[in-house]
Image (spheres, rainbow, N blue to C red):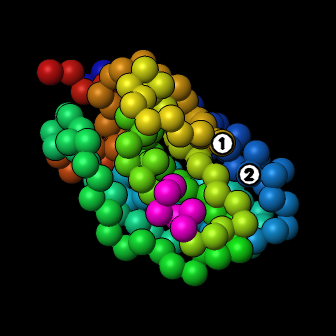
Amino acid sequence: MIPFLSSSDIADTVSDIAKEINNDFGANPITLVCILKGSFIFCADLIRLLTGPVKIEFMSVSSYEGTSSTGTPIIHNIPSSLNGKNVIVVEDIVDTGICLNYVLELLMLQGPASLKVAALVSKPSRRVKHVTIDYCGFEIEDKFIVGYGLDYNQLYRNLPYIGVLEN
């Protein structure tokens, strides 16, 4: 495993994202929608740094088998009662944008007051669907990364850093 982003780099970036969200929303309530399973560590670290009132919802979204996307999102636990709320989707990585685009379309149907995206990592070169990332931690080239919640076949989520999985 080749280390790519250190735990201190990640902590600094999560802190920066939290500051941006705190500046944008102040004391206004927000609802985080954590995309499982990969975002749970990022979301846990982020929520502890937010200063306003925060609710949290969880969605399970997947489209990967091994190191490739199937292109077909499978979604479970779609949150309800987002009408009129400030919603931030918390995503570990935005790759093709297919899953995130689908999630955003589903959540928009509920009429949130605002709908934004916080992503720890973005791979713009892989984008198939355009999605706006309002709070982006790292933009990287096309590497398969694991750690800090990101996985390969459910393994390596526990790494405190992000590493590049080499074949």
How many residues crowd mark 1 within 10 Å: few (<14), some (14–19), many (20+)? Answer: some
State whether residue 144 appears in this view: yes
Instruction: Residue 92: name its quadrant.
Output: top left
Instruction: Residue 14: name its quadrant.
Output: top right
The residue lying toward the viewer, choosing from 25 and 127, is 127
Of the residues under marks 2 and 1, which one precedes in the sequence?
Answer: 2
> Helix, strand, or loop for circle 2?
helix
Instruction: Residue 165: name its quadrant.
Output: top left
Total numbered circles: 2
Residue at 81 percent across and 52 percent down: it is: 24
Q: CA distance from mark 2 to mark 1?
A: 9 Å
Depth-wise, is mark 2 or mark 1 nearer the camera?
Answer: 1
How far from the left and from the top, in percent, is residue 110? 57, 72
How many residues crowd mark 2 within 10 Å: few (<14), some (14–19), many (20+)? Answer: many
Residue 97 is covered by the magenta coloring: no
Residue 106 is covered by the magenta coloring: yes
The residue lying toward the viewer, choosing from 102 and 5, is 102
The quadrant of the image that shows the N terminus is top left
Residue at 38 percent across and 43 percent down: it is: 98
Q: Which residue is mark 1?
A: 134
Most distant residue in the front direction = 109
> Which region of the structure is painted magenta?
104-109
Dominant secondary structure of the residues highlighted in magenta in the image: helix
Q: Give the side of residue 72 with respect to residue 113, left or right.
A: left
Q: Are marks 2 and 1 in contact (CB under 8 Å)?
A: no
Q: Give the side of residue 154 with respect to residue 159, left or right.
A: left
How far from the left and from the top, in percent, is residue 60? 34, 63
Relative to 92, is 68 above or below? above
Q: Which residue is mark 2?
A: 21
